[in-house]
Image: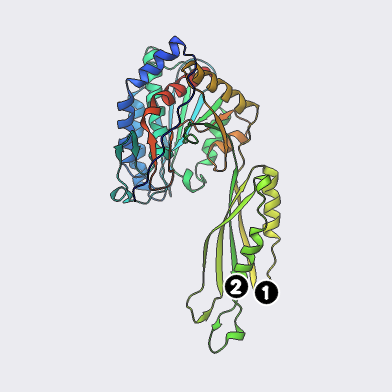
Amino acid sequence: MKKVLKKPQASKPQPVSSEASNRLLYFTERKDAITETIRQLVEIESPSDNKAAVDQLGALLAGRFEKVGGHAKFHRVANFGDHLQVDFAGGKGKPVLLLGHIDTVYPMGTLATMPCQIADGRLSGPGALDMKSGIALILHALEGLRSWHNDSVPRPVTILLVSDEEVGSDSSRRITESLARKSASVLVLEPSYGAKGAVKTARKGVGEYTIKVTGKAAHSGLDFDKGESAIIELAKQITAISKLVDLKRGLTLNVGIVSGGTRSNVIPAEATAVLDVRVAKMKDAAVIDRQLRALKPFNRKCKLEVAGGVNRPPMARGPGTAGLYKTASEIAKQMGWKLEEASVGGGSDGNFTASLGIPTLDGLGGVGEGAHATHESIVIAELPRRAALLAELIERV
């Protein structure tokens, strides 16, 4: 059965300023060019675990950004794609940092079964929403700014496109935080939220834990009573872990991967569970860490090991983020639409920058649905005003 994609709801008309209208018109006239850029990026597959593929996309983007006046350099990485930094000189003061990632969750070859295509006003394909549309918006917003400012930009701009965001940002976090500390504000081009394209002013913190149980193997027919089942022990632990969920506090735990055992006729000596943790407040990260590490075996003849932790702190809606949202909503109003905000459960590299106290606004990328899913797509008609919003924000924040 073909999935029916939802159409975005129309927002209530707002008064439009002449300058805002002209800038929106600029991007409306270039909507097809923005769409074509997104198509080109989607058709270069870039899974996090394929360095060669990600580096191919990084090289293409470096060239595209240099054609519009940027200075590109790579932060070399051994096990992931190289992280791309692009600097634009212009104006005075600290730069604004535009943050994104070029890796996707889709394995190589996904295009064969999930091709990039345009239909019913949408562009679909692996990574179209998360977040190759956001990268295209950066490129075209800067191109617009340079056309309005005599081949220059009105203030310094730094772009960082990392290659490992989808797998935790371990190799890029230090770079992201270093550049954020030198910046006046951070604009994150992750996808917007919902059909109305809300920006994200708060995100949960994210963690991952591994629960490993070691029991004792035995023949399930000859020596059943001599074995100690790691799987039974792990099942009891999973039940205990599920009781730690507290939806009112925004604390969730999800056992997403379970493995163990060797054969049906062998009492399993090992079993492992991988656990996703989401917290709305950083203090809850410490609480859940203590609770998980305090777990004790139900079967004292089994051994329990807990490893991991919260690797992305929550992104709180602090004064800096609230100020950026206010500016963004005023810009949107001048262009005739209402920009909403949202608090979401997913994390991004904006969590890192916000936790440093740097004003951070997330969700400035494409409008669509299906991130990480087979129906991932963006709404093409929304691209002009997302590009215009970004260009105006770069000038004003």
In the rendered view, tell whether residue 52 sits above or below residue 15: below
In the rendered view, tell whether residue 224 sits above or below residue 240: below
- From the viewer's side, name the closer residue of 215 and 371: 371
Helix, strand or loop at label 1? It is loop
Residue located 42% across and 14% down the image: 21
- From the viewer's side, name the closer residue of 326 and 43: 326
25 sits left or right of 217 in the view: left
Helix, strand or loop at label 2? It is helix
Residue receiving disc 2: 232
Residue 108 placement (x, y as % from top left) = 34, 51
Amino acid type of the residue tagged 1 in the rendering: Asn
In the rendered view, tell whether residue 237 sits above or below residue 144: below
Residue 270 placement (x, y as % from top left) = 55, 72
Residue receiving disc 1: 299
Q: In which quarter of the image is residue 142?
A: top left
Amino acid type of the residue tagged 2 in the rendering: Ile
**Within 10 Å of the Cα at label 2, are there few (<14), some (14-19), or many (20+) other Cα atoms?**
some
Q: Nearer the viewer, mark 2 or mark 1?
A: 2
